[in-house]
Amino acid sequence: MGCSFSGLNALYDSAASDVWINETRYKIVRQLGEGGFAFVFLVKEVINESSDGGLSKKFKDPSHISDDGTYAMKKVLVQNNEQLQFVKEEIRISSLFNHPNLLPLLDHAIISVKGTPEQTWTHEAYLLFPAHLDGTLLDHAKTMKAKKESFSTSDVLEIFRQLCAGLKHMHNLETPYAHNDVKPGNVLLTHRKGQPPLAVLMDFGSARPARRQIRSRSEALQLQEWAAEHVSAPFRSPELWDCPSQADIDERTDVWSLGCTLYAIMYGVSPFEYALGESGGSLQLAIVNAQIKWPTTPKPSYPEALHQFISWMVQPQATVRPRIDDILIHVDKLITKFSN
């Protein structure tokens, strides 16, 4: 879906590059990233004398208010009704969650726009989030690999525990939700002096009610097709690669991805990505058979208990995988054992 639009960046080059989300005005500071038809900007709230307090009156949680008025704004160019429904669903689902380790949706607006020959989109969606400028776990992994550095065992466990806490909130709702795309690129890490980094899980575009009954081959294939589009391959659970015609899918698809993400916090990649570099290697086969390869180099060296912990989560049979509450109990024991 990668696509560029002529003149799009020019929209933000002028001094008048302000955006309104409902009654609040923002000035675009700079672009942070883009992908497909979505662009992420750092924006600053514009407060004037007639302002009624802006965002601060909207938030239930005062901790979401930015000290300096800066936020991250995701702009989505919506080209058809299917994409419009997808964005609306992301907004609806994001609004269900309220947890310090889940990125909150602070405000949103969808506006219809008149098309031109150069402009193929019919709506623009604006989603406002807190700004986390230190980057993602994936960014950190790349930087640390280049410097031949790694997280300490205690930081690995603290980061992981925060992800588990956020997922527990989703999994334990009255209707349990699965994130469906837990991976280092969807984890924001913020440095904190004298404390472990703050880990916040983001991007709920793939989140759905976790429990699904599959009762036919066509339903199984439908789920696999959906997963191929929405769940990153190196972190996708076996049942989403090869779904049986009779299966009860639940939130333990996320537990598999969590196990892969713990490995990635330690070693920078998913435990199955080695298969992509092997002649005749198959990522799907490595995942379906849970063929983990552990690094043999002495650095970084982590306790064997962490390898066993990963293996416990990364089990091909979903029915024997632990649930998030069990994982949290276990990670707390490991933190007590290996804390500095």
Image: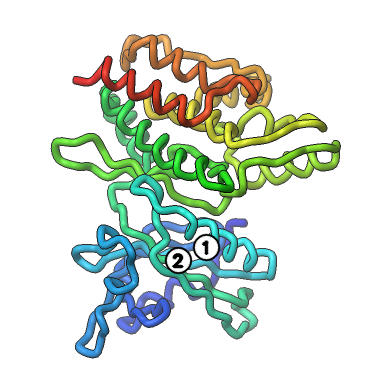
- Of labels 2 and 1, earlier in sequence is 1
Name the spot of residue 134 as percent of width and height, x first: 28, 47
Name the spot of residue 125 as percent of width and height, x first: 52, 71
Label 1 amino acid?
Ile
On-image quarter of the C terminus: top left
Label 2 amino acid?
Leu
* Residue marked by disc 1: 91
Q: Residue furthest bottom?
A: 50
- Residue 297 versus residue 96: which sits nearer the camera? 96
Q: Secondary structure at mark 2?
A: strand
Q: Residue at x 26, y 58 (%)?
A: 63
* Residue marked by disc 2: 127
- Residue 31 versus residue 168: which sits nearer the camera? 168
Q: Residue at x 74, y 39 (%)?
A: 213
Question: What is the CA distance from the residue labelled 2 to the residue labelled 1?
Answer: 8 Å
- Residue 146 versus residue 135: which sits nearer the camera? 135
Considering only vertical position in the picture, is 292 above or below 106?
above
Q: Tell me whether circle 2 and circle 1 mark residues in contact (CB < 8 Å).
A: yes
Considering only vertical position in the picture, is 8 above or below 71?
below
Name the spot of residue 231 as percent of width and height, x first: 60, 41
- The quarter of the picture where residue 59 lies is bottom left
223 vs 59, left or right, is right
Q: Residue at x 60, y 69 (%)?
A: 78
